[in-house]
Image (cartoon, rainbow, N blue to C red):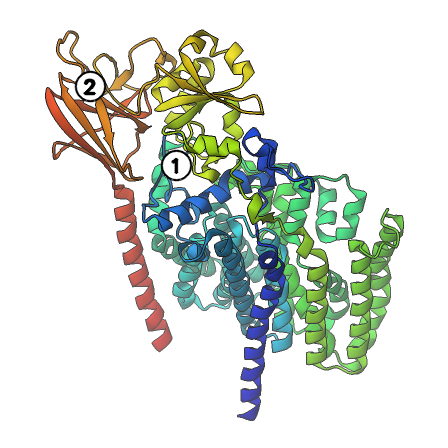
Amino acid sequence: MQLKRKHILESLFCLVVLVLIPVIFIFPLVRENRIPLYLDDVFLEPPWEEARLADVSLHGNPYHARHALQYFPAFQFIHHSIENSTSLLWNSYEGFGNPFLALWKSRVLSPFSLPLFVFPLVSALQWSLLLKMVVAGWCAFYAALRFGFSTAIGLFIALCFQLGGPIFLWAGFPMSDVLPWLPLYLLCLERFAMGQFRAWPITAIVIAFMGLGGDPETLLATVLFGVIYVVVRRLRDPEAASIPGSVYSLSVALCFGIGIIGVQLLPFIEYTRQAIAPATTDLVSLQLRDLVALFDPAARLLTSPNPQKEALYHLLFAGTVPMLLLAFWPAVRGSAVKLIRRRMEALFIAAMVLALLPFLGGTYNYLPLLHHLGPEHFLVVLGLAIVFLAASTAEEWLEMDPEACKVSLKRLGLTLPVCWGILLVIFLYSKYGLNLNSPLLHNILIAVCLLVLMTITLFYPRIRILGYGLCLLAVTNFYWLSLNQLPSTRSDQVFPETPFIQSLQQVDSRIGGSEAMKRWPLAGNRISQVYSTSGTSLSRYMQYIEQVDSNPLLLRRSGAEVFLLTKEDIQGEFASVRPVLSIQEVFPTGAVLFRDLEAKPRARMIYEARSVESFDPALLHPERPPLLEGASLPEQDTGARARARLEVPVKNTEVRVHVERTRPGVLVLSDAWYPGWNATLNGQKVPILPVDGIFRGIEVGEGEHQIIFTYRPMSLIIGCILSLVALTVTLIYFFRLRTS
């Protein structure tokens, strides 16, 4: 009883440590009022250029560019919508409107987005990072104990995972919302491998939490890893459960896990049917020599610098200590317990098989669904696998008998000089010299301390000395090497409201104009614009914008009553309409804000149109009548032309339009046509017709009318029902499992 109580107290101590250490790491962010996102790339663009400080360095890293183009505007929209009690279903800031919840990467339903609903934006992002690190640490600690590791070694595993690259250095990416649950997923896979097929409800719940994280690519990669693991586990251990049984149980868990997140999945599927498939995320071509650099930070000094590859190195970063401990594994594996050896090596081999795919020259692109994955998704499990194998090395080091110790020391005499000698040679070869701030020097010091610790425990084998010593070395190593590499931005440099931005915020309509705006994430400052920078766009929208590139005056139909143009635009595509453009403001960057006196309002009546059966973007022309799908207007009709007026306030998911007394025509609202939008005309439900392929149109008869557009997607309703049913069934089987 006393021993059990002591173990409980030690476990509680470890759980507290797994909260305090992240607090220490995040404290510099709080002290300097920074957010864990890299947003400095916006200072490359004119709206924010004048606010750039002299000490701001621009990396030009496409991975980090997503922070400004996609992730922060999404966080901003969530926080602003909650603050103003508006809907999160539809985002009207980009393009002509876009479904927001349906975009999986918006992370609306992620548990780690909860701080955005409670705290101010800067504090919310800091709390979100802390929550990820704590959950990751606790999950890894629990999984380590269930795998049979001691409490001290379990703490080492948890610290390396919560402070590692996937959670800490990639904190701004959606995969960091998925991976905190990864240790529990590994534990579930091991249960399947041991024949515990009835554990599928627990696995389904874990998969659901991972799915809510907002990164379907990472979820797909982890599912693929699960299949590889149960296969390798069986091949390594004939006593493991059969491959068909394990795969079947994993498939059942996956089906119910996906069903639980139906509220997210079905709107996403609906969106993918209306959107152009995103380009591959393979932003960098990897070669086999890069695999060496992934494992050995020192070897990166011998490769050409590449910011994209450096981001991938950060993703794999599990700390120097686990990497160095791997050199001990060949020496101790012969004396390791057979079950532990097979389990840990199966985990490492499965992770390596997955990680090797992007090094095969893109051949995986021919496999179903895998062409959506980038190199980063194939590397997500490898770091944790390294930590588990390193932890097994540490425990087996203490379990050796005298004869096994003698054999192991002979092996170490061969492996250690080779592994650590490489570090020393590269250190001498590098340009860092004896610079005390050199990361490589820190690695050498950690290696020396680790060797001393292993030597001490060789003569005085105590698990707590080794385990907590490894924890101390790991935390020191992470603090030295990773703290300054965390992408972050000062709060006063987060999309600063420059005079340029303030002028745009005063515009009372959507902003169109220069093609350069395709690179300006104005949504980060809550400014509506014609162009979308987030990389997620409806196919009809993209077809319309492609025609805008050759016929810029089509922007007049987009609800953009002001144009932001450069001198090149005025002298080029917009030269013919310069006489009807009224100058509103000239900016120091050379850009000019014009009001187009002949632009069409966001809501308007049309009485002439070209009837078409389906949308053909080639038929779009600014001087010809709009395209109308599914209806036709009278060829000749006389009578009063009426004005349409938007009634304020205009909400994300509800737009009210009043039409004066009119002859028969079509009301056009220059917002994106999309399934889920419904309309009522004087209280009667009417169909919404696509106008010019992308806008919403309503046929109206003679008289005065009140039209209400509301967004209530059926996919969301069905998704909620699916989630409720799947969760209910899963919980029933879960409690039956607990009580049986």
- Give SS at disc 2: loop
Relative depth, front residue between 314 and 369: 314
Disc number for residue 272: 1
Q: Residue at x 16, y 23 (%)?
A: 660
User: Hey, which quadrant is residue 641 in on the image?
Assistant: top left
The answer to whether residue 544 is above or below residue 155 is: above
- Give SS at disc 1: helix
**Which amino acid is tagged 2?**
Ala
| Percent of width and height locating residue 111 | 43, 58
| Percent of width and height locating residue 6 | 57, 87
- Residue 14 appears left or right of 446: left
- Residue 334 appears left or right of 90: right
Q: Residues within 10 Å of mark 2 (few under 14, many from 20)?
A: some
Relative depth, front residue between 545 and 25: 25
Alpha carbons under labels 1 and 2: distance apart: 27 Å
| Percent of width and height locating residue 257 | 39, 56
Q: Residue at x 80, y 71 (%)?
A: 408
Circle 2 is placed at which residue position? 631
Which mark is in front, 1 or 2? 2
User: Hey, which quadrant is residue 493 in on the image?
Assistant: top right
Relative depth, front residue between 395 and 571: 571
**Which amino acid is tagged 1?**
Thr
